[in-house]
Image (cartoon, rainbow, N blue to C red):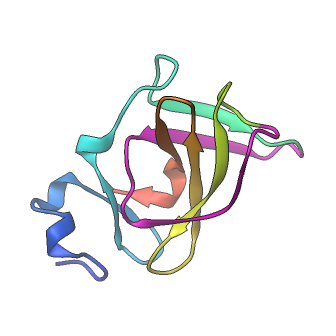
């Protein structure tokens, strides 16, 4: 079992998606979803930093923080707040919350699995 892996979160290691820095379980492949027709989105912030963001229904290995905001959102109608690795604190992406649902947009370059 990898460092940081909790057995109740992961039944088959090959289905896990891990933090690239500490190898803790972040989510599983069963949580991969499409938002606006795609799983993978190329997004950039207001200073031009580009992110490859994958969409996930849930990410139990993330801690969410910050006040949800619509400012500079990448997904129309969705508020966002930060999502960090619960094990090592690495910034992994954002949680997006809409009127009907919410999801995680995680930076794929910071994940493995």
**Quarter of the image with the N terminus in it:** bottom left
From the viewer's side, name the closer residue of 30 and 1. 30
**64 up-or-down from 69: above or below:** below
Residue at image coords 26%, 45%: 29
Q: Is residue 15 left or right of residue 74?
A: left
Furthest toward the right, the residue is 47
Magenta highlight range: 47-72
Percent coordinates x, y for residue 76 in the rendering: 68, 24
Q: Does the magenta stretch include residue 61?
A: yes
Percent coordinates x, y for residue 79 in the rendering: 67, 40
Furthest toward the front, the residue is 99
Furthest toward the top, the residue is 37
Residue at image coords 21%, 65%: 9
**85 up-or-down from 103: above or below:** below
From the viewer's side, name the closer residue of 4 and 97. 97
Percent coordinates x, y for residue 3 in the rendering: 29, 83
**Quarter of the image with the C terminus in it:** bottom left
Q: Is residue 93 left or right of residue 47?
A: left
**76 up-or-down from 94: above or below:** above
Residue at image coords 22%, 76%: 6
Q: Does the magenta stretch include residue 86?
A: no
């Amino acid at each position: 079992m990898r460092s940081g892996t909790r057995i109740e979160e992961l039944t088959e290691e090959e289905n896990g998606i891990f933090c690239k820095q500490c190898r803790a379980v972040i989510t599983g492949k069963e949580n991969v979803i499409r938002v606006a027709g795609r799983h993978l989105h190329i997004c950039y912030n207001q200073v031009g930093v580009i992110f490859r963001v994958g969409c996930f229904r849930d990410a139990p290995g993330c801690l969410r923080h910050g006040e949800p905001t619509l400012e500079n959102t990448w997904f129309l109608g969705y508020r966002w707040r930060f999502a960090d690795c619960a094990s090592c604190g690495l910034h992994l992406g954002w949680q997006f919350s809409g009127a009907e649902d919410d999801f995680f947009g995680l930076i794929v370059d910071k994940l493995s699995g």
